Image (cartoon, rainbow, N blue to C red):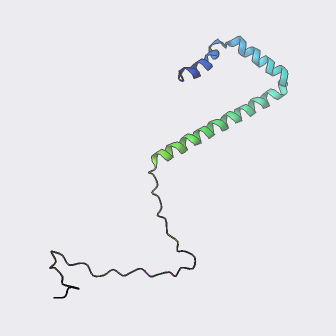
Amino acid sequence: MPMRAPIETLAFFDSIGGPEVMLVLVVVLIFFGGEKLPELARGMGKAIREFKKAASDVEQEFKRAMEEPPAKPEPTLIKPAPGAVPQAPAEPGPPPPAGPQPPSDHGIEA
């Protein structure tokens, strides 16, 4: 049903012919006069041109946004609490030895 709605709303254009268009032009000529008609047409032409340009710009922006890769989220930094003393990062110790380790006797008295 939603696909038929735009077609039905534009269906009245089929019934507009040459005589109807001439009648509209005569009414516009009567209301605006012969001197204002070129100015009115020029203004309408500019408006249509600007609308097409804006629509093209929006379309290009959508295409550009679809083509660029998604942005990675930036890491959030944890801020120290007010009044906290900054600490130097701990230095890494020696790497653990590879292979199996013998059982240790630390802390066990015999």
In the shown orientation, is residue 55 left or right of residue 85? right
Instruction: List the single residue furthest toward the front.
Output: 110
Asked whether 3 falls inside the magenta stretch, the response is: no
Quadrant position of residue 38: top right
Span shown in magenta: 83-90
**Residue 100 x/y as whole percent:** 15, 75
Residue at image location 36% in from the left, 82% down from the top: 91
Residue sitting at x 79%, y 31% = 39
Marks counted in the figure total: 0
Q: Residue at x 65, y 12 (%)?
A: 15
Residue 29: x and y, percent? 81, 21
Please provide percent x and percent y for residue 49: 66, 36
In the image, residue 55 sits, relative to residue 21, either above or below, namely below
Magenta segment, principal secondary structure?
Answer: loop
The residue positioned 47% from the left and 45% from the top of the image is 66
Most foreground residue, 81 or 70: 81
Q: Quadrant of residue 98?
A: bottom left
Q: Is residue 77 above or below residue 47?
A: below
- As drawn, the residue found furthest toward the bottom would be 110
- In the rendered view, does 84 fall on the left or right side of 49? left
Q: Nearer the viewer, residue 24 or 9?
A: 9
Provide residue 9's location: percent of width, then percent of height.
Answer: 62, 20
Relative to 4, say whether 56 is above or below: below
Instruction: Name the foreground residue: 51 vs 38.
Output: 51
Give above or below for 70 relative to 62. below
Quadrant of the frame with the C terminus: bottom left
